[in-house]
Amino acid sequence: MNRLTMRHMQDNQSGTISAVKVGGELGRRIRDMGLVPGTEIMVQGRAPLYDPVALRVRGFTLTLRNNEANHIEVEVS
Amino acid sequence: MEATVALGGNPNSGKTTLFNGLTGSRQHVGNYPGVTVDKKEGIYAYNGYKMHIVDLPGTYSLTAYSEEEVVARDFLVSEKPEVTIDIVDASNLERNLYLTVQLLELGVPSCVALNMMDVAKNRGIEIDTKKLSDLLAVPVLPVIARTGQGRQELMDSAAEVAKTKQKQEPLEISYGQDLDGVIRQMQDDIEKNRFMTECYPSRWIAIKYLENDEQILKKGQEANPSLAARLEKKVEKISHHLQRTLDTYPEAMIADYRYGYISSLLRQDDVFHQKYDKNRLYVSDKIDRVLTNRFMGPIIMLLILMGLYHFTFTYSETPVGWTENFFGWLADTVSANLPDGLLQSLIVSGIIDGVGGVMGFAPLIMFMFFGIALLEDSGYLARVAFMLDRVFKMFGLHGSSVMAYIVSGGIAGGCAVPGVMATRTLRSPRERLATLLTAPFMNCGAKLPVFALLIAAFFSENEAMMMFILTLIAWGGALIVAKILRLTIIKGEATPFVMELPPYRLPTFKGLMIHTWELTWQYIKKAGTIILGISVLLWAMMTFPGLPESETEKFEGKREAVKAAVSGSVVQELEFADQDTQLSLDALALTQQLSEIDAQESETALRYSAAGRIGTALESVTKLAGFDWRTNIALVGGFAAKEVVVSTLGTAYSLGEVDPEEYTSLAQRLAASPNWNPLVAISLMIFTVFYAPCFVAVVCIAKEAGSWKWGAFSMIFNTALAFGLSVLVFQIGSLI
């Protein structure tokens, strides 16, 4: 198992969220959308300019900016 | 039976579709007090029910971070609707239940509508609604909002809840040993002191304290400062503890446990069963492989945006033409039937032109909103924001800002009025404000005649090049000013982007029509009255004070002198001639002379009017940018609509009223005038790009930003900016 921030995941790579290291409004928004520790995610792709990133989580597609993805740690196999 | 029913749910859960299905045309849109969030209400009448339905803003959660969430929460708490229908997307159950759980924790009597059962079924999802209902302890009804299936059963059940349940026992979720202990202690204290308990459940208040909910913290300090301090202290202590032992915050832990609760709920007794892998890709995702592809995506987007633009501005031409013709006809009829004079002038130039101006925009707005509703309801708009966000983020904006810019004239020839209104698709407040304040810099259709005139006069060889440069100046200016605004008066961190890409859906025609009509009507209603007032005011400024008698007599004398110079038969010929008569050469010469005198009189009158005096008084300052009094008056007139600059310049140069489309003689006049040179023309073009938006746009800015302060800001700031830039260009240019 390898731990890295979501920003550094490859397209189509899957993993499990291990920590969301941000509070305040951004932290709240991230958690409200279901990105909490233990959640499985898959990177679906990136926008043409490589930012934001699109993920598959809990059966829907979510997008966030790279600097937002920086706060999310993911365990990948 | 009568009852108030609130509709709550996530964005894209089909809430609006259900609302439209229930209320049909019996709905109206208002505002929640003090905020710019729309409040949609309607009546559902069926089978003896008369239900007053309130569509709450779509939210993912009930925190205090966004206006929408605060509005939804306050409505539930203070208006106490008899029942809240929570619309849940069955094909996206886990995340949708996150809001449901929060509604249940708040203890509002509710009823869950499990929407899009058909989509869920196609995805191999099976949901045992009976068991889910038992576990949540509220009715759960399957519906398909698009087709209306299950709607009646839902409303029967809602009516039942409204009738029988006075109070819903708040749902209690365990938040783990650490937090549960603290919550219990806080709850005791809250209950003992009846701390805001008339509004909220005690456990809920404790949880909100742990979540650092700004609104509740503030209310708490007002209600009972010492208890509030005690609770805050407790939160601080447990926060420390959690940080030290688990490296997390209470609010993070609460979210974890809520999602944990939902997952375990769905696992119990096979409530939820999905045949396929839940992250498997569906048709929608396959479409996205093409539409957001690195190479194809931007190209297709460009084509779609050009298509929207083409649709809005080409197809609306005909109805815009109809309204223009109608008001033209009305003006002619009134002119023909009223004697010349102030009353006629007031009605024709003040009122009819003003109302015509408002109504002339209406078809344009209607087409634009139809186009945007189509993009929004289908889900494509979210993709546009996704693809362009990287660029707009650099300037403190949001990917969705592009719509407002393009409609305003990012592709030359748009209109800032629908552009400003298009910022409604933006959910981030700071980014939205920066967008709507800068969108009017784009080169709208009304600025084009001004450019065309000046280019024809001074740069006739490089027409296309000049237009292209002006477009670049507008974009560059808008983006840079947006960045400056975001660094100064609209300071603040970027609103989190975190955005759902909803599955592509075919919009319903009914939904599109309702959406379009709603916004068009709001525009007519809100903008109409104010615009009429300003139009009359501008008319008065350019009319009063009228020339003193001695002056008019002087012109009358000139006319008499000209008539006396020719033989009496020619004057008689003119008096009896109607439009179709072929005039003799002498008579033609006389008409020519007379109309020249008329034009001179108009010029003198304009200079004598309030607007003229302002223009003349400002000349000493505006000389810095190379503008004389004539240009100043024209720019004052341009506040009514930018193309008026051309016609007013015509009057100021004694050419009579100049049709903005027919500017050749005026262009020749300018080119020959000693007051003008290419540098003055460049300076004026820069000024035209940046100065105060026309007043219709200003009214829209004030309405959309929620305060007249921003309307005033856009007039003063933009004019100051434009003047600064023009002076800079003119002074540097003069040195070279």
Image: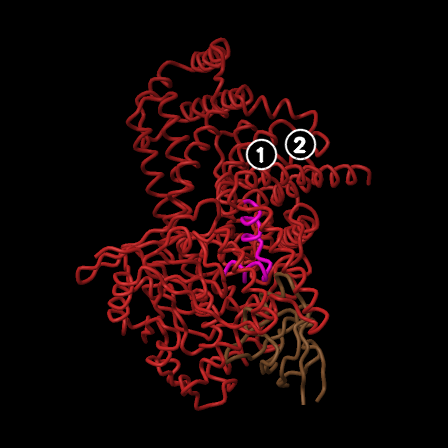
Chain colours: A brown, B red
The residue to which callout 1 is attached is B635
Q: Is residue B588 magenta?
A: no
Q: Residues within 10 Å of mark 2 (few under 14, many from 20)?
A: many
Mark 1 belongs to which subunit? Answer: B
Q: Is residue B67 left or right of residue B716?
A: left
Can residue B493 be seen? yes
Residue situated in front as seen by the camera: B614 or B577: B614
Which residue is more in the foreground, B66 or B505? B66
- Look at the image and give the residue range highlighted in magenta: B204-222
Q: Residue at x 41, y 51 (%)?
A: B78
Q: Are marks 1 and 2 in contact (CB under 8 Å)?
A: yes
Name the amino acid type tagged 1: Leu
Query: Height in image: B353 above or below B390?
Result: above
Q: Identify the image quadrant of residue B151.
A: bottom left
Decide: is B559 above or below B645.
above
Q: Is residue B635 left or right of B237 when viewed as pictured?
A: left
Which residue is at the far right? B736
- Name the chain letter of the residue that bears numbered label 2: B
Q: Provide the residue designation for mark 2.
A: B627
